[in-house]
Image (tube, helix red, strand yellow):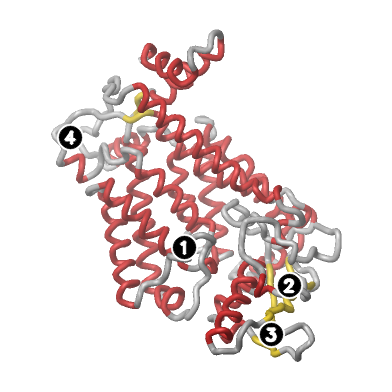
Amino acid sequence: MSAQATSIASLALGRVPGGFERLTSRLIRSVLHPVSPYSAAAFRIVFGLLGLVAVVRFALNGWISQLYLEPVHHFSYYGFSWVQAWPAWGMYLHFALLGLACLGVMLGYRYRLSITAFFLLFTYVELIDRTTYLNHYYLVSLLSFIMIFLPLNRVASLDALGSPKAHDSPVIPRGILWLLMAQVGLVYVFGGLAKLNPDWLFHAQPLRIWLYNAGDVPLIGGLLREEWVAYAMSWGGAVFDLTIVSWLLWRRTRPWAYGVLVLFHLATALLFPALGMFPWIMMGVTLIFFAPDWPLKLIKRVRQHVNLRQAPVEFRRRPPLNESPDWQITAAIATAAIFLLIQVAVPLRHYAYPGNVRWTEEGYSFAWRMMLTEKTGQVVYRVSSDPDARATLVYPDEYLTPAQVERMSHQPDLILATAHLVRDDLANQGYGRAQVRADAYVSYNGRPAARLIDPTVDLATVQPGIGPRAWILPYPEKRG
């Protein structure tokens, strides 16, 4: 194993002499170190189960129709305008296939096919409309993409039962668990870093607003409306996000840290129902931080507790078979490293844009900026044939559902996209080229409403893109 790791390091780095090569070889040996596959299998089972619950929840609440069938228009992501909602029968079939894919992942049946189908079906749904974006949907897409390339069906799966090696003691490289830990851990780390802003720390916003609105919760409702509670929860939430990964990584504190994590997410699920599946997803996926053989130890304890005499399954360490050439292992490690670097870079991209990201929302999405902003907005468009002509007022609800209007009214890119809807609709009706300007007023984190969009800019001529948007006005005060 040591010789193989050294050769891999030499292949990757060109035999750099000295301590750097030894350090790299040691790192690669750690990545390839064989461990029990049962934690990875538990991750797969929990992931599939949570996905199945989410699909059933979507169907029972009527969200398939509400979010994808009722809207006449959908907001596509930049570069993904080809992703469109299916007709009614197609959307219901899509979700049915997604549910089957979840079941296949959970049971480990044709795992590669099931997880690939899950990733494609789930991500397609999320790309249909930007107004449905949620951080945990993005996390699910990322995790399912990673899982396509990981052997999470070595044990506790129907695939393993049908394998000629079903009675062996399989292993997986420890790096597989590390990769999953890293992706999950980044959510907390960047979530905590994003909370280090004046609104969160020094004004307890937006928690003061949300906790006051949750004041009708039985028993503790009155307490939630106390100002000091909002400050305590703001600081506690920041400390939790910034430190929980380190506590989970340390074996001595891991059980206690996970207990705190469960209590934290149960509390957020109770107080903020709009979070949906997020608390449950995080309680499930963070189990990956426990020892690789924790499911076996849990089964053993349960059997001892109920006085069952059956011998528990034991994990027998053995060196993994060196089935892959050195270059393939090197490529896999390099690809995983590049993937994680991208996951670090994407949440930091907002520094490339001017202004307050919580106001402009440039670089806000895909960055784990969770529970940071409470925004409300109102938008009306002034449409005319030229700047001097009398303008006609057009309201977003003439084109969008109430849920879409609520989401677009404070997001500049969606305000722009709606302006293009108005422009294209008028052109299709034979009115020619129309100039579309927006009167958009937005309030965030309890501040007075202010103009978000430059009212002199003809949004009909502005093209979407990833560059800075000069037509977004700064908030007219310095706080936050």
Q: Amino acid at mark 3?
A: Val
Q: Amino acid at mark 4?
A: Ala
Left or right of 237: which side holds 2? left
**SS type, badge 1:** helix
Q: Amino acid at mark 2?
A: Val
Tell which residue pokes out farthest to the top in this image: 18
Q: CA distance from mark 3 to mark 2?
A: 20 Å
Within 10 angstroms of label 1, few (less than 14), some, or many (20 or more) residues?
many
Disc on res. 442: 2
Discs 3/2, front: 3
Residue in the image at 19% along x and 29% along y: 168
Q: Earlier along the polypeptide chain: callout 3 or callout 4?
A: 4
Circles 1 and 3: CB distance less than 8 Å? no
Residue picked out by circle 4? 166
Residue picked out by circle 1? 127
- Is 403 situated above or below 21? below
Looking at the picture, how far across and down is residue 368, in whole percent?
Answer: 59, 52
Residue picked out by circle 3? 383
Q: Earlier along the polypeptide chain: callout 3 or callout 2?
A: 3
**SS type, badge 4:** loop
- Is 276 situated above or below 236? below
**SS type, badge 2:** strand
